[in-house]
Image: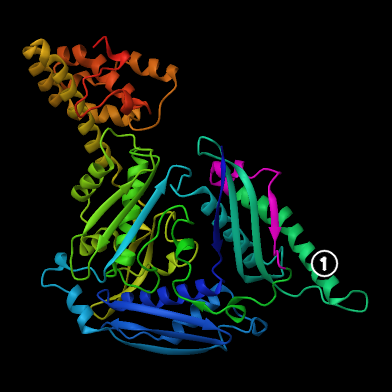
């Protein structure tokens, strides 16, 4: 039986997101002047007031008021009617120096042995449902609000829009756990009171008329533009939005009072929106306003990078990675992996976790170095999620040795797929080694020692070739149709003959092809136990 799953998103004008963006903008400004800054910055915003508090250890001075007003203006709170605007709101700063007790746990004589900034558990998640390796429901909810923001800034259509908005998308999944269609869309958007009561209509009639207009505009303007945006990007998610979805727009009625005036905003209250929309677990704390010595942020980014690269490599269709740390200790206390039953490897999830610890350096200092987390890149993460964004490089202004300069820095670097090749190499080499070990065990009772030793030697000699073969064949993806399997077997160039003794390659090509074909089978693990079973699958009798 299929099921429904829902994720929500909020716009940059949501009061909690206003707070997140101010906190991260202040963090960026400290890093811009002193990349060794330690920052924990929290923001509260309400009617006509912003309060910034936190702990900082830095050689830099930051004009908190100027930074906060710039962010508020960029978001779009520029009118007094909003009861919260960039030019007139009060801004209070209560930032003080970081505790030396905390600092001594983080700072070490050797930088790479820098301890974790706090204890905690962090999760990274990825799935194969979208090109971003994120849940489809969350991506769609975010894209709807991104397009709504574009419409608001263009000022040509839906001219009544104000900055605060939310969305929810419910997707119907089939028995195969694949998304089938968008079931329900919810859009709540702040707006001007563009229809007022007069002699011809009461206050309630005016409200109903406004709601009807907004609903129609969402249906005929926003949703088609959202679909067009996805289509321009070549995203197949657009096909999920048909004509039979349920639409709710401002379900409670008019939404004139909003933003910080309607709801006090605080940093870190949208951690599910910021992460995986409820599909993946979330532990530890929130992200915004924290420098990367806090593993709440840096280790969460590292866990996402690991999960995304594992899914992209085809290790599993869905993966959750948990990392745990203790304050002042560099190495993670534990690594946990859950593939939700979609593991395509013939090793356990515990073994996958063990190999993650060997492949990735998860000490906080090395995470910071790998992803460039001392650069002023965090304001960009504070709206529309910290994960799933497109990695890009941009010139930014920084101060080095007291002088202003520009340098190219990477944004969303943890979203790069730069570990896929390493994962494929390790996984496929493991697959081939274990396969040959099993074959050797099969021949051993028959006293075919010469063949055993020859096959072991050939297997080891062909490992690099097998790895390349595995990449091109998509070894770790789901089962292929029968016609594709035949095509794979018939392709004589599966293993390049020039790289090894031609006779050995020809002799054992069919063996490797069978290994590859079997590894693509979802039921392979139940047929064939690499770790000791003597059962041989039916389709391998010709070995």
Q: Where in the figure is residue 507, as x and y percent of width and height?
A: 19, 11
The residue pinned by badge 1 equals: 209
Q: Which residues are magenta?
A: 230-252
Nearer to the camera, 165 or 247: 247
* Residue toward you, 534 or 408: 534
Q: Is residue 417 visible?
A: no
The question of residue 46 being in magenta is answered with: no
- How many residues crowd mark 1 within 10 Å: few (<14), some (14–19), many (20+)? some
**Figure quadrant of residue 530:** top left
Identify whether 485 is placed above or below 107. Answer: above
Instruction: Indicate the position of residue 270 as horizontal and vertical percent values.
Output: 48, 67
**Is 189 left, or right, of 462 in this rendering?**
right
Q: Quadrant of the N terminus?
A: top right
Residue 504 in view here: yes
Relative to the observer, which residue lies in front, 38 or 322? 322
Residue drawn at point x = 26 percent, y = 9 percent:
542
The location of residue 40, given as percent across then percent down, is 34, 78
Relative to 535, residue 352 above or below? below
Does the magenta segment cover residue 233? yes
> Looking at the picture, how far across and down is residue 194, in whole percent?
78, 73
Is residue 27 shown above or below 148? Answer: below
Q: Quadrant of the C terminus?
A: top left
Labels in figure, total? 1
Q: Quadrant of residue 448?
A: top left
Looking at the image, which residue is at 22% across and 24% down? 533
């Amino acid at each position: 039986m299929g099921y429904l799953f829902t994720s929500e998103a909020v716009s940059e004008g949501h009061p909690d997101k206003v707070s997140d963006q101010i906190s991260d903008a202040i963090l960026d400004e400290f890093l811009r002047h002193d990349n060794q800054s330690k920052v924990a910055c929290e923001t509260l915003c309400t009617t006509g007031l912003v309060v910034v508090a936190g702990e900082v250890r830095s050689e830099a001075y930051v004009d908190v008021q100027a930074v906060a007003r710039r962010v508020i203006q960029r978001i779009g709170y520029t009118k007094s009617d909003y009861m919260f605007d960039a030019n007139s709101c009060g801004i209070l700063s209560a930032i003080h120096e970081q505790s030396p007790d905390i600092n001594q746990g983080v700072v070490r004589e050797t930088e790479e042995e820098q301890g974790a900034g706090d204890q905690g558990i962090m999760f990274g998640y990825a799935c194969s449902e979208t090109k971003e390796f994120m849940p489809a429901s969350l991506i769609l909810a975010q894209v709807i609000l991104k397009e709504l923001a574009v419409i608001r800034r263009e000022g040509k259509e839906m001219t009544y829009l104000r900055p605060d908005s939310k969305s929810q998308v419910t997707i119907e999944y089939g028995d195969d756990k694949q998304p089938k269609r968008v079931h329900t869309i919810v859009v709540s958007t702040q707006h001007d009171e563009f229809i007022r009561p007069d002699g011809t209509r009461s206050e309630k009639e005016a409200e109903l008329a406004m709601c009807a207009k907004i609903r129609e505009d969402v249906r005929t303007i926003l949703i088609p533009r959202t679909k067009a945006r996805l289509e321009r990007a070549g995203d197949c998610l657009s096909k999920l939005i048909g004509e039979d979805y349920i639409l709710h727009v401002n379900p409670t009625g008019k939404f004139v009072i909003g933003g910080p005036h309607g709801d006090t905003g605080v940093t870190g209250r949208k951690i599910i929106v910021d992460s995986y929309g409820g599909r993946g677990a979330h532990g530890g704390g929130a992200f915004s306003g924290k420098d990367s010595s806090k593993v709440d942020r840096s280790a969460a980014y590292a866990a996402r990078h690991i999960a995304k690269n594992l899914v992209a490599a085809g290790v599993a269709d869905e993966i959750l990675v948990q990392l745990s740390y203790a304050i002042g200790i560099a190495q993670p206390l534990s690594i946990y992996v859950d593939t939700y039953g979609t593991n395509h490897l013939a090793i356990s999830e515990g073994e996958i976790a063990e190999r993650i610890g060997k492949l990735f350096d998860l000490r906080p200092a090395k995470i910071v170095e790998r992803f460039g987390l001392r650069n002023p890149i965090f304001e960009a993460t504070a709206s529309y999620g910290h994960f799933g964004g497109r990695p890009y490089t941009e010139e930014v202004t920084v101060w080095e040795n007291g002088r202003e300069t520009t340098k190219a820095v990477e944004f969303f670097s943890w979203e790069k797929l730069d570990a896929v090749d390493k994962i494929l190499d390790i996984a496929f080499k493991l697959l081939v080694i274990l396969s040959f070990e099993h074959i050797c065990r099969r021949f051993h009772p028959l006293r075919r020692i010469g063949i055993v030793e020859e096959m072991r030697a050939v297997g080891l000699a062909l490992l690099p070739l097998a790895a390349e073969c595995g990449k091109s064949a998509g070894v770790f993806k789901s089962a292929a149709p029968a016609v594709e399997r035949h095509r794979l077997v018939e392709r004589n160039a599966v293993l390049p003959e020039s790289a090894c003794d031609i006779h050995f390659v020809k002799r054992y090509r069919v063996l490797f092809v069978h290994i590859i074909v079997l590894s693509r089978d979802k039921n392979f693990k139940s047929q064939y136990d690499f770790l000791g079973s003597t059962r041989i699958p039916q389709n391998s009798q010709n070995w």
